């Protein structure tokens, strides 16, 4: 729950709206603080692992992050020399003199790689192939940066591989991608490219994984394989058990529905749906396994948080999760109050100057 902190600075616009929304919330119901933290979802860096250990919760690492690390390691092993050479060539072609010359010969412009994202590598290779026929062969400085025939063959041979990696990256970004489905993609990459040790990053026993038992358990549960859970995996997934009250409510609901059916309908329902209920009982009634491999909203939040003050971020989080507590009318009211406060401050400053 959002908690305000005492500060000597005036509240921001977001905080002002938040305080009004909090007042409305307190008037409508009693707010109780509930500890609902069951896991930490972040990148797989050592800082997040240490934080998870301090909080005493498991870490569900970002599977897109794991795959990106694996692909970057693959590129470093098989395309490092070509990548460095073409990177220097693209930088050289981006100079004023070379860029002006290329502008007269082709509409294509040099494309530099984004060093923070490997997905720019195939784009840079493709642009290099498009610019290659227009390179001035008489310029020794340029020709020294052109890859050798063997390196060109290596680039062409790895082109489809990079496209495969890019398709997996795109699939991992889907909002409905589950851990089980992402595990299928990981296994496909491991089996399709045995020349590289993808298992060190994408396997179930990869060192980068913080909570191996929990991740494996969630994958098995999503695949309806609860019976294969080990003792350690069952213990790791215990925190996902629904409260006893939820079991009782779901049971009462089922009884009420059955009571409205005739004897024959109840018998047929038990016959037709019995095996299915047995198979999915643990999944649908006793376990919460809706963890996605990766929460996109969290990534956007982490990116946004880097440029915000802590109290502003806290206010935005509260407003985002409690949209029913504020509206345009409340926002307009706060805006008017802020403008009035600003005008009063300006009048007081003018009065002090005149005095």
Image (cartoon, grey):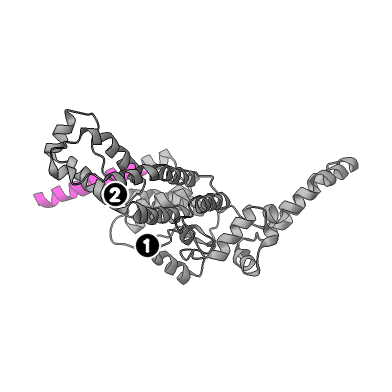
Q: What x and y, as percent, mark residue 11?
A: 32, 54
Q: Residue at x 39, y 44 (%)?
A: 157
Picture residue at 21% right of the left edge, 33% below the top? 134
Q: Residue furthest right?
A: 263
Nearer to the camera, 311 or 227? 227
Magenta part, dominant SS: helix
What residue is disc 2 on? 82
- Residue closest to the eye, 56 or 78: 78
Q: Residue at x 36, y 42 (%)?
A: 156
Q: Is residue 336 magenta?
A: yes
Counting other residues with Cα less than 10 Å from the Cα at mark 1, is it few (<14), some (14-19), or many (20 or more)?
Answer: few
Q: Secondary structure at mark 2?
A: helix
In the rendered image of this protein, does residue 198 appear above or below residue 341?
below
Residue 220 in percent (x, y) is at 63, 57
Where is residue 280 drawn, in percent x and y?
A: 71, 52
Mark 1 = which residue? 5
**How would you rate the neighbour count of disc 2 (Cα within 10 Å): few for under 14, some for 14-19, many for 20 or more?**
many
Front: mark 1 or 2: 2
Real-space Cα separation, disc 1 to disc 2, in angstroms = 54 Å
Magenta stretch bounds: 334-355
Q: Residue at x 90, y 41 (%)?
A: 264
| Residue 227 seen in the figure | yes
């Amino acid at each position: 729950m959002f908690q305000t902190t005492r500060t000597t600075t005036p509240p921001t616009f977001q905080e002002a709206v938040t305080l009004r929304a909090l007042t409305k919330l307190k008037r409508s119901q009693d707010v109780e603080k509930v500890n609902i933290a069951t896991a930490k979802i972040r990148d797989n860096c050592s800082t997040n692992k240490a934080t998870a250990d301090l909080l005493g919760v498991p870490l569900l690492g970002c599977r897109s992050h794991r795959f990106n690390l694996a692909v970057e390691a693959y590129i470093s092993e098989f395309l490092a020399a070509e990548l460095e050479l073409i990177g220097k060539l693209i930088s050289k072609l981006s100079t004023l003199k070379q860029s002006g010359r290329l502008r007269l010969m082709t509409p294509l412009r040099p494309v530099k790689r984004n060093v923070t994202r490997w997905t720019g590598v195939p784009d840079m290779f493709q642009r290099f192939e498009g610019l290659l026929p227009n390179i001035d062969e008489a310029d020794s400085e340029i020709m020294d940066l052109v890859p050798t025939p063997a390196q060109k063959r290596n680039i062409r041979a790895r082109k489809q591989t990079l496209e495969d990696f890019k398709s997996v990256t795109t699939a991992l970004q889907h909002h409905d991608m589950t851990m089980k489905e992402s595990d299928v993609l990981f296994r496909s990459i491991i089996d399709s490219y045995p020349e590289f040790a993808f298992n060190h990053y994408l396997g179930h026993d990869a060192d980068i994984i913080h909570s191996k038992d929990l991740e494996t358990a969630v994958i098995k549960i999503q695949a309806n394989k609860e019976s294969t859970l080990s003792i350690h995996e069952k213990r790791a997934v215990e925190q996902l058990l629904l409260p006893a009250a939820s079991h009782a409510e779901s049971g009462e609901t089922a009884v009420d529905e059955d009571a409205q059916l005739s004897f024959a309908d109840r018998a047929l329902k038990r016959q037709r749906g019995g095996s299915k209920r047995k198979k999915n009982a643990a999944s649908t009634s006793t376990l919460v396994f809706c963890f996605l491999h990766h929460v996109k909203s969290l990534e956007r939040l982490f990116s946004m948080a880097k440029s915000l003050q802590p109290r502003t971020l806290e206010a935005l989080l509260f407003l985002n999760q409690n949209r029913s507590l504020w509206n345009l009318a409340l926002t307009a009211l706060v805006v008017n109050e802020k403008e009035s406060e600003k005008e009063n401050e300006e009048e007081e400053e003018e009065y002090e100057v005149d005095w």
